[in-house]
Image (cartoon, rainbow, N blue to C red):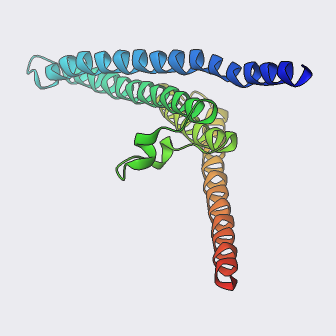
């Protein structure tokens, strides 16, 4: 009798993972919404940029249009990166808690970024995209930044140095984990050769 209830409880506990589907669907819908917003922004941006060659524009007005266009392009890139985060998060949660995505594993054209094997894998992929969003946001702020005092320039230089350090550490971590995988593969090959 106890074994029966234990089996029922464990089955219910295991099936409770399907609650993650709410986060999967929600993240996917949020990603689609951000893709839609960014694409609409691109359409309006293109319509405004068409006026750049207008001969009635003064040099000052053309410069304002140029600066605002570049700023909007950075915002669009930021939006697409955020939508990508939501997409990766959605696919990663599905692969971790529900089931492998057979089309992603079976297709040679599938991107490695969509194949998630554990939580650390998901965190590292999300962290890379979030880092890119931060870099784009810093670039956007730099476009609108007005340097009034020498200390502003120091702060700006420090921000660039910190971003460069973050990129270096990310690439160093990638190289280290790739080296670990190579060592693991070589040990596996050695064991197979012994047998």
Task: State the image quarter where residue 180 is shown.
Answer: bottom right
**Vertically, is 135 above or below 177?**
above
Whole-percent x, y for residue 45 in the image: 26, 20
Query: Which of the 4 image quadrants contains residue 55?
Result: top left
Residue 7 locus on image (x, y percent): 80, 24
Is 115 above or below relative to 69? below
Residue at screen point 74% across, 18% down: 12
- Whether residue 80 is visible to the viewer of this picture, yes or no, is yes
Residue 63: image x %, image y %? 28, 25
Farthest residue in the front direction? 1
Residue 74, position as x, y percentages in the image: 40, 29
Q: Which residue is drawn at 47% across and 25% down?
A: 144
What residue is shown at x 34% (from left), y 50% (from top)? 109
Residue in the foreground of this view, choosing between 137 and 51:
137
Picture quarter with the N terminus: top right
Query: Which one is in front, 116 or 128?
Result: 116
Examine the rendered structure and indicate whether residue 180 appears above or below residue 37: below
The answer to which quarter of the image holds residue 31 is top left
Decide if residue 145 is in sight here: no
Question: Which of the pair 86/79 is nearer the observer?
Answer: 86
Q: Nearer the viewer, residue 76 or 68?
A: 76
- Compared across the picture, whether 121 is left or right of 78 comes to right
Q: Report the residue at 72% width, 25% height from top.
A: 14
> Which residue reaches farthest left?
55
């Amino acid at each position: 009798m106890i074994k029966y209830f234990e089996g029922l409880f464990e089955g219910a506990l295991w099936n409770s993972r399907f609650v993650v589907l709410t986060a999967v669907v929600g993240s996917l819908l949020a990603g689609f919404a951000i893709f839609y917003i960014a694409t609409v922004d691109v359409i309006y941006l293109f319509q405004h940029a068409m006026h750049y060659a207008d001969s009635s524009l003064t040099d000052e007005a053309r410069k304002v249009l140029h600066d605002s266009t570049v700023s909007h392009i950075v915002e669009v890139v930021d939006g697409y990166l955020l939508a990508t985060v939501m997409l990766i998060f959605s696919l990663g949660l599905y692969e971790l808690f529900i089931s492998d995505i057979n089309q992603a594993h079976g297709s040679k054209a599938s991107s490695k970024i969509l194949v998630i094997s554990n939580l650390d894998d998901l965190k590292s992929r999300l962290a890379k995209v979030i880092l890119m969003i931060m870099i784009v946001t810093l670039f956007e702020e730099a476009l609108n930044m007005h340097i009034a005092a020498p200390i502003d320039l120091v702060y700006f230089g420090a921000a660039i140095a910190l971003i460069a350090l973050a990129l270096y550490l990310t690439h160093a971590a990638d190289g280290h984990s790739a080296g670990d995988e190579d060592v693991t593969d070589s040990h596996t090959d050695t064991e197979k050769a012994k047998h």
